[in-house]
Image (tube, rainbow, N blue to C red):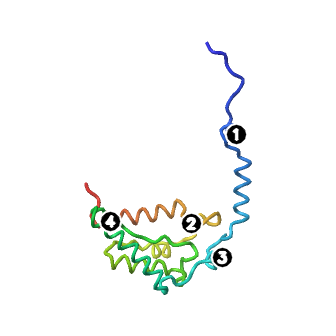
């Protein structure tokens, strides 16, 4: 029988320090420059689709993806995940419009996430605001369901 040690591992021994994590979380909230959609909107670029050089770069990227798709036979679905500040703000949806047009020109299926989010009764719940601009679990579920419906409708899943 082995002698028992007086040392018992605790969470803080494993690098988990609740106080430090809480402090870092509060500091992030304090410094977050975009606590809501309106303040984020002030920093977003406007009318991406009106800059020919930017649109040409996007089209070049999609043509490379089309070549890969044609070579491999793997279907590619495109969608644009809008920043929260772009919801209900057409001037801030230039990237979305340019990607939708370029996807159609290259023959890619395109999921309209902007319309999906704008039609949601509470679009703020689809993001982690005020903490950050990433999608919440509800946002991921909404996009995942729409992608699944699109894949099933397109017949891209093998049975």
Alpha carbon separation for disc pair 4 and 1:
48 Å
Residue to which mark 4 is pinned: 68
Choose the circle earlier in sequence order: 4 or 1. 1
- For label 3, the crowd category at 10 Å Cα-Cα, with few meaning under 14, some 14 to 19 and many 20 or more, is few
Residue extending furthest toward the top: 1
Choose the circle earlier in sequence order: 1 or 3. 1
Q: Secondary structure at mark 1?
A: helix
Alpha carbon separation for disc pair 1 and 2:
31 Å
4 or 1: mark nearer the eye: 4
Evaluate if marks 2 and 4 touch, with contact meaning CB atoms under 8 Å apart: no
> Which of the 4 image quarters holds residue 29?
bottom right
Q: Quadrant of the C terminus?
A: bottom left
Left or right, 23 with reference to 142: right
Choose the circle earlier in sequence order: 4 or 3. 3
Residue to which mark 2 is pinned: 127
Choose the circle earlier in sequence order: 3 or 2. 3
1 or 2: mark nearer the eye: 1
3 or 2: mark nearer the eye: 3
- For label 1, the crowd category at 10 Å Cα-Cα, with few meaning under 14, some 14 to 19 and many 20 or more, is few
Residue to which mark 1 is pinned: 12
Q: Secondary structure at mark 3?
A: helix
Alpha carbon separation for disc pair 3 and 2:
15 Å
Residue at left offset 44%, top offset 65%: 143
4 or 3: mark nearer the eye: 4
Evaluate if marks 4 and 1 touch, with contact meaning CB atoms under 8 Å apart: no
- For label 2, the crowd category at 10 Å Cα-Cα, with few meaning under 14, some 14 to 19 and many 20 or more, is many
Residue to which mark 3 is pinned: 39
Residue at left offset 54%, top offset 77%: 87
Evaluate if marks 1 and 3 touch, with contact meaning CB atoms under 8 Å apart: no
């Amino acid at each position: 029988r082995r002698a028992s040690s007086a040392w018992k591992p605790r969470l803080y021994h494993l690098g988990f320090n609740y106080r430090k994590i809480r402090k870092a979380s509060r500091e992030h909230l304090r410094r977050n420059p975009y606590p809501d959609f309106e303040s984020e909107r002030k920093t977003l670029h406007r009318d991406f689709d009106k800059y020919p050089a930017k649109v040409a770069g996007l089209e070049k990227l999609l043509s490379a993806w089309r070549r890969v798709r044609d070579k491999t036979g793997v279907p590619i679905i495109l969608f644009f995940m809008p920043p929260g500040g772009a919801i209900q703000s057409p001037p801030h949806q230039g990237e979305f419009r340019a990607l939708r047009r370029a996807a159609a020109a290259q023959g890619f299926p395109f999921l309209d996430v902007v319309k999906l989010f704008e039609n949601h009764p509470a679009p703020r719940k689809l993001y982690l605001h005020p903490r950050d601009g990433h999608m919440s679990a509800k946002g991921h579920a909404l996009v995942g369901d729409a992608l699944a419906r699109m894949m099933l409708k397109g017949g891209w899943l093998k049975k």
